[in-house]
Image (tube, rainbow, N blue to C red):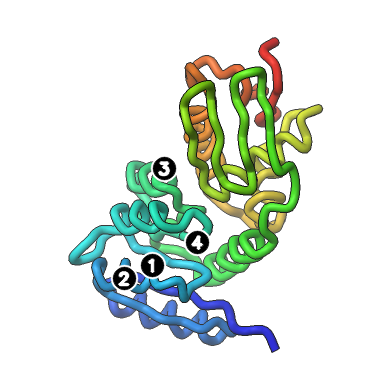
C-alpha cells in the first residue's frame, strides 16, 4: 500500500487553516500545519512533505523568505503560495523565488484541490526527457541536475523551469501556447478556468537566466498570438 501524500499548510488565519486542513484530510492527504513562519520553515525543511501551501503574510517570517530558504535547500519540493488577489507584486515575487504556482485569495477550494493534485502529479512524474539541452554554442543545460552554464556563468534552475524548457525543446518545431504549457507542464485540465500569470512570470525568469539580453531574447522567443518557442540557433 502506497503512503499518503503529505501536505504542510503554513497559514496564520485560523479559520482558513482549519478549513484547508479539513478539505485535504477529506481528500486523502496526510496534513500538518503551522501558523508561524519560523516554525513553518523548520517543518518545511524536515523532508517529510510532498507539497507546501504557503501564505505570504505570516508572523515570525514571511512567505517569501520561507520560499527562498526552501529553494536554497530543495529545488524539487512543490510550493504553492497563497496571495492577496489584488497584489501583483506578491505574485511576481513568489514565483520569482521559485514557487510552482500561486492561488489568489479569496479562492475556490475545489479549484485549489485540483491545482494541488496537478502540481503533485507533475512533480511525482519526475524529469523523464531531454537529459541535456544545448542552445547555440554557449548555453548548455543539465536537466537531471537542474543546472547549466552560459559561457563561464553557472546557472541554477528549479524543477518547474526545467520542465518548461524540456517541453519547449521537445516541441521546438512550433510555438507552444500558454494554455498548452498549463496543461502539459502544470498538469491543469483544459476545462479549468484558471486565472494565472504563472507561465508569463516563469518565462521571464528563464530569460533572465539563459539570455544575454532578456529584452531581446535569442533562444526563448515570443511568437505573437501563438505562444513561446525555444530555438537553438540565432536566426
Q: State the mark number for residue 148.
A: none
> What residue is pinned by disc 4?
77
> What residue is pinned by disc 1?
45
Percent across and percent down for residue 52 are: 44, 67
Find the distance from the CA under tag 4 to the CA under tag 1. Answer: 9 Å
Quadrant where the image shows the N terminus:
bottom right
Contact flag, marks 2 and 1 (Cβ < 8 Å): yes
Q: Nearer the viewer, mark 4 or mark 3?
A: 4
User: Earlier along the polypeptide chain: callout 4 or callout 1?
Assistant: 1
Residue appearing at x 70%, y 23% in the figure: 231
User: Earlier along the polypeptide chain: callout 4 or callout 2?
Assistant: 2
> What residue is pinned by disc 3?
96
In the figure, 155 relative to 47: above or below? above
How packed is label 4: few (under 14 Cα within 10 Å), some, or many (20 or more)?
many
Quadrant where the image shows the C terminus:
top right
Residue 69 visible in image:
yes
Contact flag, marks 3 and 1 (Cβ < 8 Å): no
Find the distance from the CA under tag 4 to the CA under tag 3. Answer: 15 Å
Contact flag, marks 2 and 3 (Cβ < 8 Å): no
Find the distance from the CA under tag 3 to the CA under tag 1. Answer: 20 Å
Contact flag, marks 4 and 1 (Cβ < 8 Å): no
How packed is label 1: few (under 14 Cα within 10 Å), some, or many (20 or more)?
some
Residue appearing at x 70%, y 58% in the figure: 189
SS class of the residue under badge 3? helix
> What residue is pinned by disc 2?
42
110 left or right of 8 in image: right
Residue appearing at x 44%, y 49% in the figure: 98
Q: Quadrant of residue 176?
A: top right
In the figure, 47 relative to 208: above or below? below
User: Earlier along the polypeptide chain: callout 3 or callout 1?
Assistant: 1
How packed is label 3: few (under 14 Cα within 10 Å), some, or many (20 or more)?
some
Amino acid at each position: 500500500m502506497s503512503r499518503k501524500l503529505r501536505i504542510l499548510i503554513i497559514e496564520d488565519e485560523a479559520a482558513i487553516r482549519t478549513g484547508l486542513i479539513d478539505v485535504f484530510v477529506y481528500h486523502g492527504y496526510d496534513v500538518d500545519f503551522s501558523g508561524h513562519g519560523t516554525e513553518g520553515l523548520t517543518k518545511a525543511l524536515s523532508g517529510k512533505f510532498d507539497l507546501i501551501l504557503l501564505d505570504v503574510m505570516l508572523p515570525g517570517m514571511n512567505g517569501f523568505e520561507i520560499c527562498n530558504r526552501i529553494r536554497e535547500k530543495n529545488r524539487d519540493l512543490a510550493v504553492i503560495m497563497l496571495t492577496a488577489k489584488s497584489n501583483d507584486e506578491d505574485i511576481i515575487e513568489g514565483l520569482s523565488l521559485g514557487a510552482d504556482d500561486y492561488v489568489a485569495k479569496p479562492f475556490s477550494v475545489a479549484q485549489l484541490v485540483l491545482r494541488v493534485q496537478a502540481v503533485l502529479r507533475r512533480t511525482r512524474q519526475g524529469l523523464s526527457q531531454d537529459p541535456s539541452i544545448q542552445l547555440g554554442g554557449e548555453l548548455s543545460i543539465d536537466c537531471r541536475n537542474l543546472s547549466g552554464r552560459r559561457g563561464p556563468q553557472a546557472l541554477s534552475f528549479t524543477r518547474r523551469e526545467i520542465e518548461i524548457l524540456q517541453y519547449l525543446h521537445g516541441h521546438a518545431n512550433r510555438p507552444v501556447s500558454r494554455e498548452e504549457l498549463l496543461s502539459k507542464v502544470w498538469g491543469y485540465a483544459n476545462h479549468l478556468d484558471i486565472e494565472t500569470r504563472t507561465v508569463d512570470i516563469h518565462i521571464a525568469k528563464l530569460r533572465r537566466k539563459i539570455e544575454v539580453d532578456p529584452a531581446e531574447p535569442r533562444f526563448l522567443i515570443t511568437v505573437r498570438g501563438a505562444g513561446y518557442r525555444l530555438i537553438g540557433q540565432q536566426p
